[in-house]
Amino acid sequence: MKPASTLSTAFLHPAGQALPEPLLALRRQRGAALVDMPLPTRKTENWKYSSKYLKLTDEMAISLPTAGKAGSALAVPGYKVVFNNGVMMPEASEYPDLEDILIQRFGDLSEAEASELAERLDSTLDNKTVQFAGVNSARFEDGLVIRLKPDAVLDQPLFIIHEVTADASGSAFPRIFVDAGRNSRITLVEEYISHGHEAVMVNAVTEFTLAEGANITNIRLSMDGDNVQHIGATGVLQQRSSRFESHCVGFGGPLRRHDLQVRLEGEGAECKLNGVVVTQGTQHYDNHTSIEHVAARCDSEETYRNIAADKSHAVFNGRIYIHQDAQKSNANMNNKNLLLTTGAEIDTKPELEIYADDVKCAHGATIGQLDEESLFYLVSRGIGRREANVLLTMAFINELVSQIPVEAVRETVQSRLNQFFEKAFQEA
Amino acid sequence: MATTDQEVNELIKREYEHGFVTEIEADTFEAGLNEDVIARLSAIKKEPEFMLEWRLKAYRRWLEMKEPDWAHVGYPKIDYNSISYYSAPKRKEDMPQSLDDVDPELLKTYEKLGIPLHERAKLAGVAVDAVFDSVSVATTFKEPLAKAGVIFCSISEALRDHPELVKKYLGTVVPHTDNYFAGLNAAVFSDGTFVYVPKGVRCPMELSTYFRINAANTGQFERTLIIADEGSYVSYLEGCTAPMRDENQLHAAVVELIALDDAQIKYSTVQNWYPGDENGKGGIYNFVTKRAACIGKNSKVSWTQVETGSAVTWKYPSCILRGENSVGEFYSVALTHNYQQADTGTKMIHLGKNTSSTIISKGISAGKSSNAYRGLVKFGPRAEGARNFTQCDSLLIGDRCGAHTFPYIESLNKTAIVEHEATTSKVSDEQMFLCRQRGIDPEQAVSMIVNGFCKEVFKELPMEFAVEAGKLLEVSLEGSVG
């Protein structure tokens, strides 16, 4: 049977009507735009390497019912919000009730607040390049809005646990919107985890808007199981002198796609994007990032590292776009890839599009294997070949892992990486 | 479908009859493209029958193809039926009668480039007895080439004299199904160059279209086929630094290079077609497919190009590295000014063991132009120990131009290593200050800096070409500062 060329109508029926009317209206409007949405193929430029992994069935169109409260068992060193199958679980969440930092479910918003939010949702993402964010906007059943008033600072990291219970086929559509006021500051950790073994899709959208001088650190851990197709998008809009720092750590799966789009709209804004991806078996991971320098004197720094083992497939596409008025821009992009076996595949495309002349832009990309001489050096000093491989592979990404500012997250990542090494380097 | 197929078939039959019996009188075909036109074209050129078949096959396929729209360029839609696909060489009385009739601007450019007087006339299309000059050149080079056994002639001649060679290799590197413009070219190519270098022969001189007699008026759909047999070497120069007078707006050329075991081909291009005026009016569309197949072990192909002309350029000289230890190289300078648009780069496809490639691309954008590098480096699963190094640098002059980089890197082999680097910068105020301080005027200073920026590529050009290329940049950059 030929795969369908447009999104099945089964995906156009949202569940959960408990949202305020403005958000329901937004959902209907986005849903109408999805009719006959073409599904990506190999000819779709931004899905060129990944379209073959996208396998949507009509069974997966059903919204997963909220199930357990397993997430409540997770201890985190900070505040915690738990989402199960795209719906927030207040009883499993622990966060403070502060005057200057409002953390609310979409369902708890007043009509006026909801109407304001509806206007701002989707404003940070380019709907032409992140087609699937539109599916989230048409389907979200719940969501979290975090509003930081000017100068507000959240004293501890806020962990958002996105948990999927896959006891049946279906989808989850978690949605987060963060509105950071002037000079406010927050560290937000998003963890995606799953239980169960049925084929499910997670379609997650997180948006950040940063007012002047705001400072956001976002850590995103993608650790769903091998039954989960994950399509995520993160949109960032930055005003004058704001700073956004992102650490994305991804472990492969049947389909993993993350779009990260940053627009530097105010002078002197700054962003730093780090990413680590490891894949093994027949896993896949595709990172697409876009940094747009709209205003002058902005800095961006991007470093992504991919490791592909066995027969897995890792993709990176980084785009830097400098607008005509973005003079004195500084943009740096670096993508290094490690191909551990022949049979695995790595594709990378670091793009520059520059329309201003007084800029400093550079990008670099490499694909290679572990350095034979370094291996020899270690082995000649009595370190086993396997251990030497692990050491050098860890060294390849440690520069980025060590920069993750929350210690507990670093530990989680390290233990997951150890599992990866265990499987990737089995020979003596 | 059945009826249309039938109609087409009928059409073909009918045209076959006419195509072969019609007496050809017209010098120029009326505008339009159909199978009849192709049959007539093939008949005029007295081509063997397999060629006509091949052209028709390409044409039928082309009808089903779509014009590519992915390149970072914009131009008005081309009406392929408004083009005449054959025109006989011009009669002398239609050409300018002396240098006095030629646009003085053009002559001034020749002056600046230091082009010898007798060549200026030929370039400007003046009806002086250009043959006088060419004959002497021709005889001096024909003899040693024949002695070495090198075949160097127009592709039409090759089709008559060496049909077996053409049949064996034509379309093997760039099949007619490859892309829209290659398909069109296969159907209607007017003429081009054919080179065959036999086993173990080092071609005794640099071959150049410019010196080949009858090379003028090869038309807008040029086809070049170069075959280097085992252990041979050839260096080929295409184009020339002087601005060429040309009436055709669309150019869709195809170049195919084939290197067998231990063979080496060096292909250098200097392209300086009319880029349109400073308001972006007119200018040539250059949609070229250039590809080399390194079939043999230890073969090597090196592309060097200096692109300063054309309103729109769409060109990716590529190497398919199939043979073990084969080497591909790409050195490019692309300069765009005013409203010029260039989308150019290369593809290095590593299939064989220990293949290696180097890409050095320098893009310079000035005025309101747009200059994009688009490249692909691919390592197949059997490309053990393959290696690539890529460097693409862009230089921006003025704040209304664009410089873009779209590199695709795909690796399927763990022992393959690829490194890609790209930078974008402008002529810095410090550099300018330093030059000005030493009494160098701004225009000259920019030219010096640009020349330095391109040095890595210029050193790959044959000597005299390199000197001319430097001057060419200077002329092309005029009016970009201040």
Image (cartoon, grey):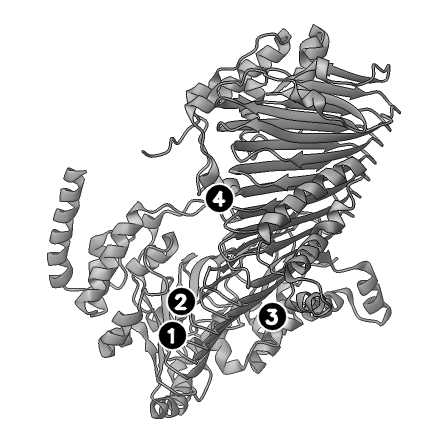
Discs 4/3, front: 4
Crowd rating for badge 4 (residues with CA inside 10 Å; few <14, some 14–19, many 20+): few
Disc 3, SS:
helix
Badge 1 vs badge 2, beta-carbon distance below 8 Å: yes
Instruction: Give the answer, above or below, for where A165 lies relative to B387.
Output: above
Q: Quadrant of the N terminus of chain A?
A: top left
What mark, if any, has residue B226 been given in the picture? 1
Mark 3 and mark 1 on one chain? yes
- Residue under numbered circle 2: B255
Mark 4 and mark 3 on one chain? no
- Residue under numbered circle 4: A48
Mark 4 and mark 2 on one chain? no
User: Mark 1 falls within which chain?
Assistant: B
Going from N to C along the chain, the mark reached first, 1 or 2, is: 1
Discs 3/2, front: 2
The residues bearing labels 3 and 1 have C-alpha atoms spaced at a distance of 27 Å
Three-letter residue code for mark 2: Val
Badge 4 vs badge 3, beta-carbon distance below 8 Å: no
What mark, if any, has residue B472 been given in the picture? 3
Q: Residue at x 68, y 15 (%)?
A: A89
Three-letter residue code for mark 1: Ile
User: A388 and B246: which one is in front?
Assistant: A388
The residues bearing labels 4 and 2 have C-alpha atoms spaced at a distance of 28 Å
User: Mark 4 falls within which chain?
Assistant: A
Badge 4 vs badge 1, beta-carbon distance below 8 Å: no
Instruction: Give the answer, above or below, for where B226 lies relative to A152.
Output: below
